[in-house]
């Protein structure tokens, strides 16, 4: 998510000249769907443009196709997607402060329910929300009201190359830091880079931090309320501080220049079979397949310390669409989400186009290895929620950037813990 903003526009119908590959989380894209003179049906209703602001640029092409399809079925409606990543939260807040909030915007779940509660439409009584699985609604519910539309069920852990593990003689998947380092030594001895690290991206680090922190377990809401109140500190979470040992291992057995490696380069190293592991999620598989469609991959039960029973993956629905309650196109926006939830195309959009797990009841399951692994973990493995949803607004990016400083050697462990604590306190006070 470290990239310069740039944009592209698509209009439907249009002949698309392919000069840009969109993959991973490294490009800002503005995507439009619509056309003038779309036929007699378009003139029968007032033309409407639904504006959507979001991150997740890896979804750009699927969104274009989805917008095209919706336009075919609703010729008077143009859906305009503006996609940014690196400074997304800043951009969204600027739009809010300037009174230019789009019809729909993307955010996380949990604490973002509070951050944006004054701007969002209450979906509690919308009929189409009955088609969303109950577990996905937990992260978007505040005071008994459904404040957002959970789009995707995502998972995150170490993704590994099964053939490279077998070639290196790794017969049991590592579940502790000690076992992880032993596996790395075997891979390195076999002339394979153990870890492809995309640490130029702050979000890669905050997601790794999230997974380690989640192993704390217990009542997360109570725990983070105590940290917000100042009765505990982030650095008091023993399990969360295991992040340092994990990062040290990944850096010791890393690809060259990990702090200069972005998402695309990280995925390329892995997909080309040059590296055996990378800390990423289900969203990365489509980018992998564009490089190597036959690569045999899976999720490791991600080690979070020396207790192998806690090794697992993060699974949650964090990507959320929120509807502007003051949208002048509210009726058409709700009609679009009803279509996205109940039509055959809409139900198949996430699993077929985005290649991830849908939150819609009865939706098809994606033909993707990481999605299948996620299903198996949900049935019989250890899973954790995306606890970063409880973090104060802004902590995701700032914690990732603090960990980048640690990896660069500009601050030591104690200084890093101090910065993580002080940053949390500062952000909490800023909201009071």
Image: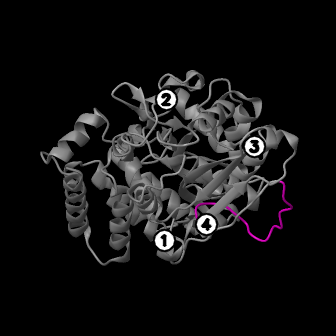
Q: Nearer the viewer, residue 336 or 137?
A: 336
Single out the mark in the foreground, 3 or 4.
3
Where residue 67 sits in the image (x, y, percent)?
73, 47
What is the distance, in whole Å, between disc 4 and disc 2 at their CAs? Answer: 31 Å
Residues at marks 3 and 1 touching, judged by CB atoms closer than 8 Å: no
Which tag is nearer the camera, tag 4 or tag 1?
A: 4
Assess whether mark 1 and mark 4 are in contact (beta carbons under 8 angstroms).
Answer: no
Which residue corresponds to the image point at 63% horizontal and 24% vertical from the top-left? 361
Q: Nearer the viewer, residue 168 or 11?
A: 11
The residue to which callout 2 is attached is 123
In the picture, the disc for residue 200 is 1
Query: Which residue is pictured at 21% across the width and 59% down the height?
Result: 426
Q: CA distance from mark 4 to mark 1?
A: 14 Å
Q: Toward which corner of the image does residue 99 lie, by quadrant?
A: bottom left
Specify whether residue 140 is painted magenta: no
Describe the element under mark 4 as helix, strand or loop: loop
- The one of 86 and 380 positioned closer to us in this rendering: 86
How many marks the image carries: the answer is 4
> In terms of sequence position, does the residue under pointer 3 or pointer 1 come before the other?
3
> Is residue 36 shown to the viewer in this render?
yes
Q: Residue at x 40, y 27 (%)?
A: 145
Categorize mark 3 by other alpha carbons within 10 Å: few (<14), some (14-19), many (20+). Answer: many
For the residue labelled by badge 1, is the local secondary structure a helix, a strand or a loop? loop
Residue where numbered disc 4 is placed? 27
Q: Earlier in the sequence, mark 4 or mark 2?
A: 4
Magenta stretch bounds: 13-26
Q: Left or right? Give the position of 344 relative to 249.
A: right
Q: Which residue is tagged 3? A: 76
- Label 2 Cα neighbours within 10 Å, binned few <14 / some 14-19 / many ≥20: some
Q: Position of residue 3 (x, y in %)?
A: 54, 71
């Amino acid at each position: 998510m470290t990239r310069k903003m740039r944009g592209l526009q698509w209009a439907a119908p249009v002949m698309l000249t392919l000069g840009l590959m969109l993959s991973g989380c490294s490009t800002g894209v503005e995507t439009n769907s619509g056309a003038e003179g779309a036929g007699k049906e378009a003139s029968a209703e007032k033309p409407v443009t639904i504006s959507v602001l979001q991150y997740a640029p890896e979804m750009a092409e699927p969104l274009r196709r989805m917008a095209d399809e919706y336009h075919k079925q609703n010729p008077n409606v143009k859906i305009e997607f503006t996609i940014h990543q690196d400074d997304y939260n800043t951009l969204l807040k600027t739009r809010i402060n300037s009174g230019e909030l789009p019809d729909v915007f993307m955010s996380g779940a949990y604490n973002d329910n509070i951050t944006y509660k004054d701007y969002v439409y209450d979906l509690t009584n919308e009929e189409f929300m009955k088609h969303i699985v109950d577990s996905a609604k937990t992260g978007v519910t505040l005071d008994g009201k459904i404040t957002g539309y959970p789009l995707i069920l995502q998972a995150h852990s170490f993704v590994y190359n099964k053939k490279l593990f077998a070639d290196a003689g790794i017969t049991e998947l590592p579940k502790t830091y000690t076992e992880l380092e032993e596996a790395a030594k075997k891979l390195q001895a076999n002339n394979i880079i153990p870890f492809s690290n995309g640490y130029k991206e702050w979000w890669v680090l905050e997601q790794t931090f999230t997974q380690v922190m989640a192993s704390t377990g217990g009542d997360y809401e109570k725990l983070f309320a105590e940290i917000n109140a100042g009765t505990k500190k982030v650095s008091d979470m023993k399990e969360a501080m295991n992040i340092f040992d994990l990062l040290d291992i990944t850096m010791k057995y890393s690809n060259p220049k990990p702090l200069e490696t972005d998402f695309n380069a990280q995925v390329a190293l892995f997909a080309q079979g040059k590296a055996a592991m990378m800390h990423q999620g289900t969203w990365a598989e489509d980018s992998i397949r564009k490089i190597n469609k036959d690569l045999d991959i899976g999720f490791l039960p991600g080690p979070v310390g020396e207790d192998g029973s806690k090794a697992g993956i993060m699974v949650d629905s964090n990507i959320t669409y929120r509807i502007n309650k003051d949208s002048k196109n509210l009726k058409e926006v709700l009609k679009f989400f009803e279509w996205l939830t109940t039509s055959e195309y809409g139900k198949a959009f996430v699993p077929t186009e985005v290649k991830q797990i849908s939150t819609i009841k009865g939706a098809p399951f994606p033909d993707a290895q990481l999605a299948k692994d996620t299903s198996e973990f949900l049935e019989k493995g250890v899973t954790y929620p995306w606890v970063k949803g409880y973090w104060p607004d802004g902590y995701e990016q700032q914690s990732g950037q603090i960990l980048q400083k640690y990896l660069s050697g500009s601050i030591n462990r104690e200084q890093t813990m101090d910065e993580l604590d002080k940053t949390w306190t500062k952000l909490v006070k800023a909201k009071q």
